[in-house]
Image: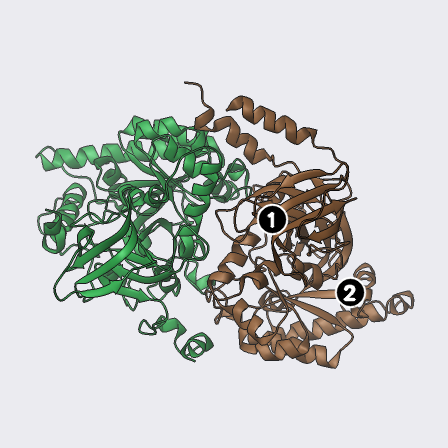
Chain colours: A brown, B green
C-alpha cells in the first residue's frame, strides 16, 4: 500500500508541467454548451485549449489517451465567490489578507495584490474539481470591500488571470451598519461615492476633495462608477433588491450582480427583466438575519423558472478561504430542491464565468481553455471525486497537504 | 424490558437520576419537585407499517425489501412480510428507512435565528468556569431552526453551551418538538444532562484578551484541574454528610455540576480539536476519576484512534471543516472513517444550524472519502455515525438510535439513498408520530415566522 502510494505520488510529481496533447476517450461529456451532454463523448486538448469535442475523435499522433470509461467529463468548477489564497489559516491571529480593518483603503483594496498561489488550500480545492475562483477581500468599516480578482487553482505564479474584475459593495444590512446603522444613510453614501468617483480627479485637484471618498478610493471606483466594471452587491432582502432595481433603472449604464439574494425569489420577475444576475447560496433557508426572513431552499429553482441569470456560491456570510470545494455540494442541494441538474452544474461553472465576463471558460467547446475534470461519479453528488483534473490542459497533482496527512495516518498503512 | 422503560419507568429513571443529584447536592430533607423536569409527551400516533423499503437498522445492517412496524411509539419489528391489523400502511418501495439522526452538538435555541444581540445566548462569557449554568435556560423554543432540523431527519439533538469557557455549563438533550412553547416540552425524558468543557484556543483567547486566566493552553489545564480538585472535595464532604459525618457544604451550583461529572450522573462533552490536547484532557479525567463521553470537533482524532478506543471516548466530528484556525489546520476528510476503522465510536455532528439539516450528506462524504482511502465502509455502517453512536455518547442508546424492537420509534423515510446529495426526508417520526411530512402544511412555522412573507410564500 505504501509502495503504491509512493509510486502514485512519484507519478503525480512526474506529470509534465507543459500542456500536452490529450485525448479523453469515452466520457459522459458535459459541454455546458450547445452540445449538451454527450454520452460516449471524447475531448481533445491541444496547447491548453479544447480542440475538439464529440464522438469517436481519432487520437492525433503523440497524443496521450485517457480512458474515461463512461464517467463524467466536465468543465472545471468555478467558485463564484471565495477567499481562497487570501490566508493559510483564517483565524487564530494568523495573517489573513481577506480581512481589512480601518478606513485607510476601501474601494481601492485589490484582492489580486494579496493572492498567494502557494497556500495549501489551493491543492485542497482543485483536487475536488474546482479550477477557478473569484476572490474578494472583506472590509469592516466602509461600504466598499474593494476590488475582486479571478484566479486559477493551478498554484502557478500566473494564477491571477484578471485583477480588479469587480467592485464589492455592501448595500444591505451590513452596509447600513457601516453608515451609522441605517439604510437611510447607506444609499446617499453610495450615491455620493459614485459622484466622487465620476468627478475624479477634478474635484481632488481643485482642492475640494471628495464628499465621502479619499482620492485613492475615488480613483479605484471611477471605472465602476462609469459602467466599465461590475458592482458585486451584497444584499439579501426583497426590499433591498427592489431598491437596487430602481437604482439600475435610473442609472442604466451601471452594472450590478447581486451576491446573496436570499429573498430574490419574491422579486424574481422584476430581477429577470432588470437583467441583474444573482450569486446565491442554496443552503440559506433560515431567517437568521432580518434581511432574509423569507429565505427558502428552492430559491434557485424559482429564479430559474423566472428566467433570472444566477450562479451558486456561498452567501456573503459564509465565504471562506478553505471550503471553496463545497460549491458542488451547494449545487447538488439545489438539485434536491427542484433545480434541473444541467442548470445546477452550469451555475458552478459556466454561470460564474459569464457573470464575470470570462468568455473562454466554463464550457467544453472548441477554443475554450482546457479546464477539464474527469469524475468517479456524478460531480454534484457528495460521494463523488475527480480522478483527473486539468487546468489549461495541464494535468494537476491530486496530492494536497490533507492527502499527505491522510497517508501518514491511514490505519491501512499502519505497520502491525 | 425496553418497552417497559417508558413512559412509566423512564419517569422513574429521571426521578432517581434527579434524586441522586439532589442527595449529592443538598441533603435538606424536603426537596420541592424536580426542577425543570421534562414534560415531553409523544404526539398521538397510529400503528404504522412501512413496507418494502431499504432499511438501515442503525446497528450497521442493511435490509432490502424490508418492512418496519411501529406501534404505541415503539419499534415492534423490522423484517420481511410483516403485517399488522389496523396499521397505517406506507409503501416504501424505492425508499429508504433509517433511525432518526441524532446531532450530538447543536446550538439551536441558544443561538437561534434571527441572530441578533438578544439571541446570542449560548456563551456565559463572564467567568472561565460557569459550570452552574444550563443551556436549556437559554433555549428559545421558537427557533425556526428546529423545524428545518426535523425536515433534515433530526429526531434528537443535544444542545450545548458555547466553547468560550473552560466549563461552559450543562447541555440538554432535546426532541425537536414543533409548536413547543417551553423547553421542558422538548426535553428527552430521562436523558442525562452533560457538562460542556472546552480545550484550546477559545477560552485562552476570550480570557487572555481580558488579561485573566486562562490565557494559554497551560492556563486551560490548570483551570480544569483546580476546579475538579475543589469539586472532588465538595463531593467527598457531601458524601460524608450523607453518611452522618459532618455538615454538608453550602449548596454550590457550580460544584454540583462538577460533582455530577465525578459521580457519573452528568456526562462530559469536551470541545477539543488537537490530538495532544485530547491526550491532556484524558490525563485530567484519570487524575479525577471521571469518564469523558465524547470529544467534540476532534479534528485530529485520526492521530489518536487507539487511545480514544481504549478510553471508550467517542469522537463527534465534521466531515471536512478545516483551516479556520490553527487547531483545525490538520483536518482531513477521512477523520471519521479512520476513527471508525480503528474500532472507535465515530459520530458525525453539526455544530451548525445549516449543517444539522443535512448531516446525512456529511456522513456520505466521510464514507466516500474513507472508501477512497481503502477503508471498507458499508452505507449502513456509515449510518451508525448518525444515530447509534451519538445515542451512546448521550447515554440514550437504550432508548433510541437503532431500529431494535422496543426502541422509541424515531424513524425517517427518505426519498432515495440518504447517503446522497439528492435524497430528502419525506416523513420523520418521533416516538412513532409524524413530526414532519414533506409538502404537508400541517406543521406551521414557529410563532416567530407567522405573518412574515416566508409563511405567506409557503402558503401559496
- Residue with the mark numbered 1: A27
Residue B270 occupies quadrant: top left
Q: Which mark, residue A229?
A: 2
Q: Earlier in the sequence, mark 2 or mark 1?
A: 1
Q: Residues within 10 Å of mark 2 (few under 14, many from 20)?
A: many
Chain bearing mark 2: A
Residue B245 occupies quadrant: top left
Residue A286 versus residue A107: which sits nearer the camera? A286
Labels 2 and 1 share a subunit: yes
Place of residue B157 in the rendered image (x, y in percent of width and height, measured from the top left):
32, 53
Place of residue A137 in the rendered image (x, y in percent of width and height, measured from the top left):
68, 53
- Identify the element where label 2 is drawn: loop
Place of residue A155 in the rendered image (x, y in percent of width and height, measured from the top left):
70, 40
Q: Where B198 sits versus A138, above or below?
A: above
Residue A117: in sight, yes or no?
no
Residue B95: in sight, yes or no?
yes
Chain bearing mark 1: A
Is B189 placed left or right of B136 in the picture? left
Quarter holding the C terminus of chain A is top left
User: Residue at position x 13%, y 53% from top?
Assistant: B6
Amino acid at each position: 500500500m505504501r509502495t503504491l502510494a509512493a509510486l502514485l505520488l512519484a507519478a503525480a510529481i512526474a506529470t509534465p508541467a507543459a500542456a500536452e496533447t490529450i485525448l479523453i476517450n469515452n466520457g459522459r461529456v458535459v459541454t455546458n454548451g450547445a452540445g449538451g451532454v454527450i454520452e460516449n463523448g471524447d475531448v481533445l486538448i491541444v496547447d491548453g485549449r479544447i480542440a475538439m469535442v464529440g464522438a469517436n475523435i481519432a487520437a492525433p499522433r503523440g497524443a496521450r489517451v485517457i480512458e474515461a470509461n463512461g464517467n463524467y467529463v466536465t468543465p472545471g468548477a468555478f467558485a463564484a465567490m471565495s477567499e481562497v489564497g487570501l490566508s493559510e489559516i483564517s483565524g487564530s491571529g494568523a495573517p489573513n489578507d481577506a480581512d481589512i480593518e480601518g478606513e485607510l483603503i476601501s474601494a481601492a483594496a485589490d484582492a489580486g495584490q494579496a493572492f498567494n498561489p502557494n497556500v495549501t488550500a489551493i491543492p485542497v480545492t482543485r483536487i475536488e474539481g474546482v479550477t477557478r475562483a473569484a476572490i474578494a477581500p472583506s472590509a469592516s468599516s466602509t461600504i466598499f470591500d474593494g476590488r475582486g480578482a479571478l484566479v486559477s487553482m493551478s498554484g502557478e505564479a500566473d494564477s491571477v488571470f484578471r485583477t480588479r474584475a469587480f467592485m464589492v459593495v455592501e448595500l444591505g444590512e451590513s452596509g447600513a451598519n457601516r453608515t451609522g446603522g441605517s439604510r437611510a444613510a447607506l444609499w446617499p453614501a453610495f450615491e455620493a461615492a459614485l459622484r466622487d468617483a465620476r468627478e475624479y480627479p477634478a474635484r481632488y485637484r481643485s482642492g475640494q476633495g471628495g464628499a465621502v471618498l479619499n482620492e485613492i478610493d475615488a480613483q479605484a471606483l471611477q471605472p465602476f462608477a462609469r459602467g466599465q466594471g461590475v458592482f458585486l452587491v451584497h444584499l439579501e432582502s426583497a426590499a433591498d433588491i427592489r431598491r437596487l432595481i430602481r437604482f439600475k433603472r435610473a442609472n442604466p449604464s451601471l452594472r450590478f450582480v447581486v451576491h446573496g439574494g436570499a429573498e430574490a425569489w419574491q422579486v424574481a420577475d422584476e430581477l429577470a427583466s432588470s437583467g441583474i444576475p444573482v450569486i446565491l447560496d442554496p443552503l440559506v433557508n433560515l431567517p437568521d438575519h432580518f434581511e432574509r426572513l423569507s429565505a427558502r431552499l428552492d430559491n434557485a429553482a424559482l429564479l430559474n423558472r423566472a428566467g433570472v441569470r444566477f450562479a451558486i456560491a456561498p452567501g456573503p456570510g459564509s465565504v471562506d478561504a478553505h471550503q471553496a470545494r463545497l460549491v458542488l455540494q451547494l449545487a447538488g442541494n439545489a438539485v434536491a430542491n427542484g433545480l434541473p441538474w444541467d442548470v445546477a452544474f452550469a451555475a458552478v461553472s459556466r454561470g460564474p464565468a459569464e457573470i464575470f465576463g470570462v468568455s473562454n471558460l466554463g464550457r467544453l467547446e472548441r477554443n475554450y481553455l482546457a479546464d477539464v475534470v474527469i469524475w468517479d461519479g456524478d460531480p454534484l453528488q457528495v460521494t463523488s471525486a475527480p480522478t483527473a483534473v486539468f487546468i489549461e490542459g495541464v494535468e494537476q497533482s491530486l496530492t494536497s497537504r490533507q492527502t499527505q496527512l491522510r497517508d501518514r495516518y491511514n490505519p491501512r498503512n499502519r505497520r502491525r | 424490558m425496553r418497552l417497559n422503560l417508558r413512559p412509566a419507568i423512564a419517569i422513574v429513571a429521571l426521578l432517581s437520576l434527579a434524586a441522586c443529584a439532589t442527595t449529592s447536592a443538598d441533603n435538606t430533607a424536603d426537596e420541592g419537585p424536580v426542577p425543570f423536569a421534562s414534560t415531553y409527551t409523544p404526539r398521538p400516533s397510529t400503528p404504522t407499517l412501512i413496507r418494502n423499503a431499504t432499511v438501515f437498522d442503525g446497528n450497521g445492517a442493511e435490509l432490502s425489501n424490508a418492512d418496519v412496524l411501529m406501534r404505541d411509539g415503539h419499534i415492534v419489528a423490522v423484517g420481511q412480510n410483516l403485517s399488522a391489523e389496523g396499521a397505517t400502511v406506507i409503501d416504501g418501495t424505492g425508499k429508504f428507512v433509517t433511525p432518526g439522526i441524532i446531532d450530538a452538538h447543536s446550538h439551536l435555541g441558544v443561538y437561534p435565528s434571527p441572530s441578533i444581540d438578544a439571541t446570542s445566548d449560548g456563551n456565559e462569557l463572564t467567568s472561565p468556569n460557569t459550570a452552574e449554568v444550563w443551556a436549556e435556560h437559554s433555549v428559545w423554543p421558537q427557533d425556526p431552526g428546529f423545524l428545518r432540523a426535523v425536515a433534515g431527519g433530526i429526531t434528537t439533538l443535544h444542545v450545548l453551551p458555547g466553547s468560550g469557557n473552560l466549563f461552559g455549563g450543562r447541555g440538554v438533550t432535546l426532541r425537536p418538538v414543533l409548536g413547543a412553547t417551553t423547553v421542558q416540552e422538548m426535553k428527552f425524558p430521562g436523558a442525562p444532562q452533560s457538562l460542556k468543557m472546552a480545550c484550546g484556543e477559545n477560552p485562552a483567547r476570550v480570557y487572555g484578551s481580558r488579561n485573566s486566566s486562562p490565557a494559554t493552553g497551560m492556563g486551560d489545564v490548570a483551570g480544569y484541574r483546580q476546579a475538579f480538585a475543589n469539586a472532588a472535595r465538595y463531593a467527598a464532604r457531601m458524601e460524608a454528610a450523607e453518611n452522618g459525618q459532618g455538615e454538608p457544604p453550602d449548596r454550590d451550583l457550580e460544584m454540583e455540576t462538577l460533582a455530577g461529572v465525578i459521580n457519573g450522573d452528568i456526562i462530559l462533552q469536551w470541545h477539543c480539536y488537537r490530538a495532544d490536547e485530547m491526550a491532556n484532557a484524558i490525563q485530567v479525567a484519570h487524575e479525577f476519576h471521571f469518564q469523558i463521553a465524547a470529544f467534540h470537533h476532534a479534528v485530529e482524532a485520526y492521530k489518536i484512534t487507539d487511545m480514544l478506543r481504549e478510553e471508550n471516548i467517542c469522537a463527534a466530528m465534521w466531515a471536512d471543516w478545516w483551516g479556520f484556525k490553527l487547531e483545525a489546520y490538520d483536518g482531513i476528510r477521512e477523520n471519521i472513517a479512520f476513527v471508525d476503522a480503528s474500532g472507535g465510536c465515530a459520530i458525525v455532528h453539526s455544530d451548525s444550524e445549516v449543517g444539522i439539516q443535512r448531516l446525512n450528506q456529511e456522513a456520505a462524504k466521510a464514507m466516500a472519502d474513507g472508501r477512497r482511502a481503502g477503508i471498507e465502509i458499508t452505507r449502513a455502517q456509515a449510518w451508525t455515525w448518525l444515530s447509534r453512536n451519538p445515542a451512546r455518547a448521550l447515554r440514550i442508546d437504550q432508548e433510541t438510535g437503532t431500529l431494535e424492537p422496543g426502541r422509541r420509534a424515531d424513524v425517517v423515510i427518505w426519498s432515495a439513498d440518504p447517503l446522497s446529495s439528492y435524497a430528502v426526508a419525506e416523513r420523520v417520526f418521533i416516538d412513532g408520530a409524524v413530526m414532519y411530512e414533506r409538502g404537508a402544511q400541517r406543521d406551521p412555522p414557529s410563532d416567530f415566522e407567522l405573518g412574515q412573507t416566508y409563511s405567506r410564500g409557503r402558503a401559496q
